[in-house]
Image (cartoon, helix red, strand yellow):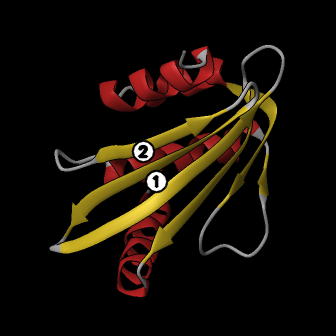
Amino acid sequence: MQPETVSRWLALFESGDMTGLDTLLAEDAVFMSPVVHTPQAGKAITTKYLATAHKVLGNASFTYTGMWWNETSAVLEFEVMVDGIAVNGVDMFAWNGSGRITSFKVMIRPLKAINLIHGLMRDALMAA
């Protein structure tokens, strides 16, 4: 059975209404980017990265192709086309006893895709 936190993340991402991150993320959530060297600590910055990633990646071609989980963590593999480039990646996240996400790590491949997403994320974050 799919954990409630995974179900909540999927519903949030599919809805496109990232304001729901406020009730899904723990105050001490940490975001780990595929291109930023240091972990980004705190709910506010984690929200900013995840909401921006949704803007960049959340198009009609986005699909989760595989999901694995245990009691307190999950790995969701995704595929999406962005500007004609096939992007393959994984979202890895863990949650606390309250079901709030405490860490969220994204990995992307291939190099061409990561370079594209890096530029798009940088531009979107700077515009925000």
Instruction: Locate the N terminus by quadrant.
Output: top right
Residue at the disc numbered 1: 128
- Residue 30, given in percent of the width and then of the height, sits at 77, 47
Residue 7 picture location, percent across and down: 49, 20
Tag 1: residue type? Answer: Ala
Residue 98 location, x and y as percent?
79, 13
Between label 1 and label 2, give the one nearer the viewer. Answer: 2
For label 1, the SS is: loop
Tell me whether the residue at label 1 lies in contact with that at label 2, contact meaning CB atoms closer than 8 angstroms. no
- Measured along the vertical axis of the image, is residue 11 above or below residue 118? above
Res 67 label: none
For mark 2, give the secondary structure: strand
Give above or below for 58 relative to 79: above
Is 8 positioned to the left or the right of 119 in the image?
right
Q: Quadrant of residue 84?
A: bottom left
Residue at the image position 32 percent from the left and 57 percent from the top: 79
Residue 35 lies left or right of residue 97; in this view the side is: left
Label 2 belongs to which residue? 66
